[in-house]
Image (cartoon, rainbow, N blue to C red):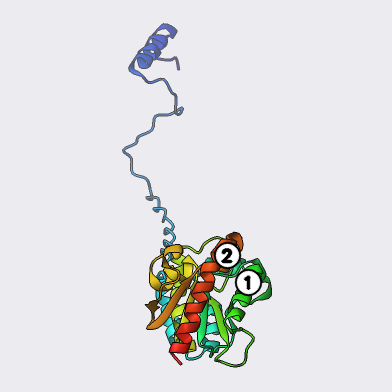
Amino acid sequence: MESAFNWHQARALLEWYVELGAVDAVGDTPLNRYELAEAMPKPVKRAAAPAAEPAPVEAPRIDQATEARRLADRAESLEALADAMRAFDGLELKRGARNFVFSDGHPAARVMIVGEAPGADEDRIGRPFVGRAGQLLDRMLAAIGLSRESPDTEAAAYITNVLPWRPPGNRTPTAEEMAMMVPFLERHIALADPDVLILMGNTPCAALLGRTGILRMRGTWTQALSKPVMPMTHPAYLLRNPAAKREAWADLLEVQAKLREMT
């Protein structure tokens, strides 16, 4: 059977299709897109989206100063207080210190001395005031008949620091570090119950008196925690400024007179 179109007609029809935009051949035979399929294809069931991970619940942030106060108030003895301080993890510098430095001397002494923090020698040995400054302190105490080694409470001295761990590079403790340790220090003083407190330098004055300026404050009696307090320049300062030893001697005589007055 001959085609209904000759070559020229077929070409003309094809060009007309191209002008209309029908440029792609999709099959040899026409397709009726309105004809229904014998069976509708089953819809593909989509996999359920994985359940979203629950957002992590952040642990409530601990107020370390409040936690320190809670632990300190629970301590009924110096031994219990030392254990509570060892267990306290709020102070980051604890992780870099070698030793926990709690105290030295007779706990029942009439005089309690508060320094700043352990230095390199104290961190190595585990006792407060054992370096050059500590050796000078021992000589100063001996000049008024006191000693940390004395078993006699009348002639004994008891020594501690605001911080029980050495700050890196012997830097001054920060206000945040002191806020965490002051509750322990206050409880320490309450348990030891000395007659007189000696605050060596600006840091213990800031911790217990809320002010600094040791060169103005030294030599003048004040009070903290219902105790008479004598602010004194730190022995390390006296090693750097030997001329200030004369004033320190006058302060020691004030302490000696106060102890006699309170006998």
Residue 58 visible here? no
Residue at the extreme top of the image, as rendered: 8
Query: For mark 2, what is the residue?
Result: 238
Q: Residue at x 56, y 74 (%)?
A: 164
The location of residue 141, given as percent across then percent down, is 58, 79
246 or 157, nearer to the observer: 246
Q: What's the residue type where badge 1 is placed?
A: Leu
Label 2 neighbour load within 10 Å: few <14, some 14-19, many 20+: some
- Contact between marks 2 and 1 (CB within 8 A): the answer is yes
Mark-to-mark CA distance, 2 and 1: 9 Å
Mark 2 or mark 1: name the one nearer the start of the chain: 1
Left-right relation of 202 to 138? left
Query: For mark 1, what is the residue?
Result: 136
Left-right relation of 150 to 61? right
The location of residue 104, given as percent across then percent down, is 60, 82
Q: What's the residue type where badge 2 is placed?
A: Leu
18 or 220, nearer to the observer: 220
